[in-house]
Image (tube, helix red, strand yellow):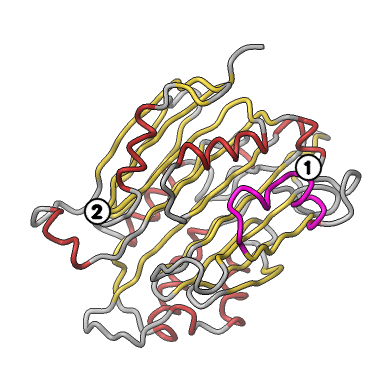
Amino acid sequence: MASNETIMSDSDQFFEGVEKLLEIWFSTSDGNDSSDLRKIPRSKLESLMKIVRCEIISFVQNEQIDAYVLSESSMFISKRRFILKTCGTTTPLLCLQKLLLLTEQYAGFTEVEDLFYSRKNYKRPELQVTPHQDFDQEVALLDAVFPDGAAYCLGAVNRDCWYLYTLNPLPRRNRDSIVGDIEPDQTLEILMTDLDPEVMAIFTKEECLNATEATKKSGIDKIIPNMVIDDFLFEPCGYSMNGVTKNKLIEMTDGSYMTIHITPEPDFSYVSFETNIPSSSYKEIITKVLDTFLPGKFTVTVFTNQVSPTKATAQEILCLNQIAKWDRRDIQQCSFKNYDLIYAFYTKFPS
């Protein structure tokens, strides 16, 4: 998602579309059901975003989730889950200590139940701000806060790869014995590069007057229907959207969402898609996303916990050696404390 914070370097314009994704699940030691992250005041969230080097642009909500479009991507807050996804030269990990204080002071949470920090490899890492120039820097900061953290790299380190940090203490008991203590959860993320120039042109002010026109012209509104869409088209180019399910449409404890962010410039085009909506076919959703944006290559990650209704659906990724015009080049599986992960990387067939 390109914004006014386009970086100038050696007379070239560049914007790092690759996002840093931070997701934290909170809990309380006393089981206090009144604890709720949405109690954190808007003014405190705005101060938090200043640390991250971005700002809140727009807001939409349903009964389960608050969704914020940011100047650099998105933030989602539900009862006990906090998601921050930021691109450009943002510094999301620098807000961790302040966030933990706010969650205890205003939301009533005293413990971090689980944490995920992930990102694709940058196109221009030297332009990032410490501690985000290198994954080792990010891991060192996270290790200082979370003694049970573990860091991973999936994919080809010398080409396209994906970094992950999560809480992964040694299990004290069989994972299947704790399913009654957790709620269903799943996340599908698709990270795309080398995108079709004609599609990317839609997300410029030269092609579309506003975000609504770009959303409809591109077909984004048809990827997952029946969403309340909050979208924004940047000047002169770049696009962000959050979608939340209409109230009562899908029953989930912590809210269903989708989010898309687009950096359309040809030299460094990038699109991310993410959703936690359960699906009977991830292949169908992935195909819709690919048909919408036509990337040259893309990464797919699927997280499912032990009680996710899409746990079996995620397994179909293992069988997808090809998806339409795209050929799978890498696939890996990991099992963590509460979640299973599938990572896959695809490239488009030569013309």
Q: Quick check: 22 left or right of 44?
A: left
- How crowded pointer 1 is (Cα within 10 Å; few <14, some 14-19, many 20+) is rated as few
Question: Residue 306: which disc?
Answer: 2
* Residue in the foreground of this view, choosing between 131 and 194: 194
Magenta highlight on residue 75: no
Marker disc for residue 189: none
The answer to which of 221 and 86 lies nearer the viewer is 221
Q: Which residue is mark 1?
A: 8
Residue 88 seen in the current view: no
Q: Nearer the viewer, residue 235 or 157?
A: 235
Measured as percent of width and height from the top left, residue 276 is found at 46, 55
Q: Which residues are magenta?
A: 212-227
**Kind of residue at disc 2:** Gln
Disc 1 marks a residue whose amino acid type is Met
Q: Is residue 105 left or right of residue 110?
A: right
Residues at discs 1 and 2 in contact (Cβ within 8 Å): no
Q: Quadrant of residue 314?
A: top left
SS of the residue under disc 1: strand
The residue shown at (51%, 39%) is 284
Q: Is residue 146 left or right of residue 51?
A: left
Query: Which of the pair 344/135 is nearer the observer?
Result: 344
Q: Position of residue 322 (x, y in %)?
A: 47, 22
Residue at 31% from the left image edge and 85% from the top image edge: 33
